[in-house]
Structures are given as C-alpha cells and as structure tokens.
Amino acid sequence: EPEVTQTPSHQVTQMGQEVILRCVPISNHLYFYWYRQILGQKVEFLVSFYNNEISEKSEIFDDQFSVERPDGSNFTLKIRSTKLEDSAMYFCASSPGQGATGNTEAFFGQGTRLTVV
Amino acid sequence: GQQVMQIPQYQHVQEGEDFTTYCNSSTTLSNIQWYKQRPGGHPVFLIQLVKSGEVKKQKRLTFQFGEAKKNSSLHITATQTTDVGTYFCAGPRSGGGADGLTFGKGTHLIIQP
C-alpha cells in the first residue's frame, strides 16, 4: 500500500541552527501538507502546497519556515534559526485531490521528531 | 478563527464498555473527518462525513454529523484493547481547493482490561 515517507525519524539540533525535514508524498497525490504536534497536544496545521506553490498557511508558519518541492518526489520543510519551542513531531501529509464535496482524506507520514536543545 | 472542540479530553473505560467522543465546530463545516492516532503513531484517517445528519458505521464504530453541520460524534460499541488511542475530529480550514485541516484536541481513550 502506498505511504508517505519522512526522513529523518528523529532530528536533534542546537538552538539557532537550520533544519530540513524531508517527505516523499504518495506519487499520484496533488496536495501536500505539513502539520506539527507538540507532545501530548493536538495536531496543528502549518502549510498546504498545491501546483508548486503555497496554497494556505497558518499563523504558525512565519518567515522562519519555508517549503519546497525541489523535484518530482520530495517535499521539504525548512526551519531557520530553530528555537526551543520548535521541538515537536512534524507530520507530512498528502491528499489525492478535492472530491466533489470537498476534502478527501489526508495520508500522514510517520513523522519526524524534532528536538531543539 | 475557526475552532474545533472535543470532549472529553480523556475517557477511561473497562474493556467491553461503550465509548463516545463529541466534536463541535465554531463554524458550519462542508465536511468533517475523523482520525485515530495510536500511542507513538501518526494520525490515520477513519472516515469523512459530508451530508447534514449523516450516519456512517464501520463495524463497532458509528459516526454522526449533526443537522447543522457543526457537530459530530464517534461512538464505539463494546470497546477492545485495540481501540486504544486518541481520536481526533478535523474540519477543513477554508473553502479553498487545498484545504488544510483544523483538528480538535482529541479524546484519549484508555481501556482497562
């Protein structure tokens, strides 16, 4: 069964450093997303990406964050100048496309646990 | 902005008892989705409800979408240890074609054998 893959599974970085989280969405999907989940809390939307550009972003997704689809398969989240509060699980998700009645299901990757020290 | 609320935050049940989680949105939703997250895992899609008053069943799970399309519930009959996890409802953030989702805080289901 097709799945969203994320690397690395765990990333430890020093405060102030830049990190790049990588994702390979399901191959025929059109919509890509990044979410984050602080330990024990809810899943929070960061950004959606469609047709090679950002479609929507939340208030969390400020200038510290950027996304890129550098080739036909990878989808990356870059976090510049990391802060302690950026420590969280970051989930990539993809969706095949909008159905006749709106959203279709999102397929989530296993996540990257980012720890900023 | 849009808010999605869920209650209860935690639910302890004995194995075999029923379980219900409730979801309420501050805005009318075009659809609502439910996800399950096992401890240490990632959210896994369960179902999407679209129509006002819709009821869908998946084995022991029953999902309802309210008439006003602002609330929803998930009911599990005769819980099993495999049902352990956090159940999230989620609604589309906006009417755009690439909607992200606003998740509720989830209900943590804890089952005592």
Image (tube, rainbow, N blue to C red):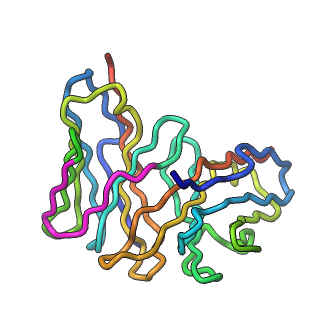
Across and down, in percent, residue B75 comes to: 21, 43
Closer to the camera, B26 or A34? Answer: A34
- Magenta residues span B44-57
Describe residue B54's horizontal placement relative to residue B2 as left or right.
left
Across and down, in percent, residue B38 comes to: 46, 37
Closer to the camera, A14 or A49? Answer: A49
* Magenta-drawn stretch contains B48: yes
Closer to the camera, A3 or B36? Answer: A3
Across and down, in percent, residue B44 comes to: 44, 49
> Which quarter shows the C terminus of chain B?
top left
Residue at the spot 64% in from the left edge and 82% down from the top edge:
A53
The answer to whether A45 is drawn above or below residue B99 in the figure is above
Please identify the quarter of the rendering in which residue B47 is found: bottom left
Residue at the spot 84% in from the left edge and 60% down from the top edge:
A18
Residue at the spot 29% in from the left edge and 69% down from the top edge:
B31
The answer to whether A41 is drawn above or below residue A100 in the figure is above
Residue at the spot 37% in from the left edge and 65% down from the top edge:
B3
> Which quarter shows the N terminus of chain B?
bottom left
Q: How many marks?
A: 0
Describe residue A70's horizontal placement relative to residue A89 as left or right.
right
* Magenta-drawn stretch contains B50: yes
The answer to whether B75 is drawn above or below residue B51 in the figure is above
The answer to whether B99 is drawn above or below residue B64 in the figure is below
- Dominant secondary-structure state across the stretch colored magenta: strand
